[in-house]
Image (cartoon, helix red, strand yellow):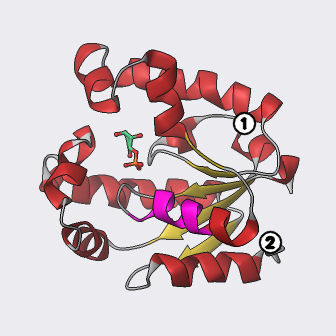
Amino acid sequence: MQNNNIILMGFMGVGKGSIARLLTKETGRISLDTDDLIESMENMKVKKIFEQEGEAYFRQTETKLSRWLEQSVQNSIISVGGGFFHVDNLQSIAHVVYLESTFDAILDRINSFENAQKKLKKRPLLQNMTKAKKLIAERHPKYLACADSVIQSAGKTSAEIADEIIELLNLQKK
Ligand code: S3P
């Protein structure tokens, strides 16, 4: 496993961050989130980066971060933004797990939270549902192309998915 890291990849709202936190709890590995790291690097929320600097700038920042992840991070769980698949060194950073789901299952998951509106609002590419539905269809083959493992996530709880990852990758529990 590359640097002994695991990347959790998949569409916005599929549960990457929640699953990463559960994996941390179960395995004791540190988890990192690329959006959180970018917000620290830029001292700005992702939403604001998109508004002020544009999506292309955000993608450049993801590329810069991908170099650092490759060189400096080991033994960790890395949840990545839904568009992170464009970086060219994923395979050198981590074993990539694609959390595959459907648009409807993702919306059901987001709407199950009390703060669903906040979760939607902070994601610039989840403002127009027609466009977002098209985006998930366009991205599915790209996610598959960079995945080392695929987990069917629709209708499962984050805890069930985390357990599946532990079993699949034979991760040691703490
Ligand atoms: C994006 C997903 C977001 C964030 C940004 C762009 C995308 O992260 O990186 O809004 O292109 O799918 P999450 O997948 O964590 O929502």
Q: Is residue 6 left or right of residue 151?
A: right
What residue does disc 1 label?
A: 89
Some atom of ligand 1 lies within 8 Å of the CB belonging to the residue at label 2: no
Q: Dividing the image into 4 quarters, which one contains the N terminus?
A: bottom right
Q: Residue at horizontal 19%, vertical 60%?
A: 116
Rendered position, 120 above or below 61: below
Which quarter holds ligand 1?
top left
x then y, percent, for residue 141 = 50, 60
Question: Disc 1 marks which amino acid?
Answer: Asn
Q: Position of residue 30 (x, y in %)?
A: 70, 51
- Residue 63 image-quadrant placement: top right
Q: Residue furthest top?
A: 53
Task: Report the disc number at residue 174.
Answer: 2
Q: For the point 35% across and 60% down, which residue is it?
A: 13
Q: CA distance from mark 2 to mark 1?
A: 29 Å
Look at the magenta stretch and give its main secondary structure: helix
Q: Residue 30 or 94: which is nearer the viewer?
A: 30
Determine the residue positioned at 24% across, 38% down. Answer: 124
Bounds of the magenta span? Answer: 14-22
Q: Is residue 119 above or below residue 172?
A: above
Position of residue 86 relative to residue 166, above or below, is above
- SS at badge 2: loop
Q: Residues within 10 Å of mark 1 (few under 14, many from 20)?
A: some
Point out the tag, 2 or 1, that comes first from the N-terminus: 1
Q: Position of residue 22 (x, y in %)?
A: 57, 68
Q: Is residue 68 in the magenta section?
A: no
- Whether 19 is among the magenta residues is yes
Kind of residue indicated by mark 2: Lys
Q: Is residue 34 left or right of residue 76?
A: left
- Report the side of 85 relative to 123 (left or right): right
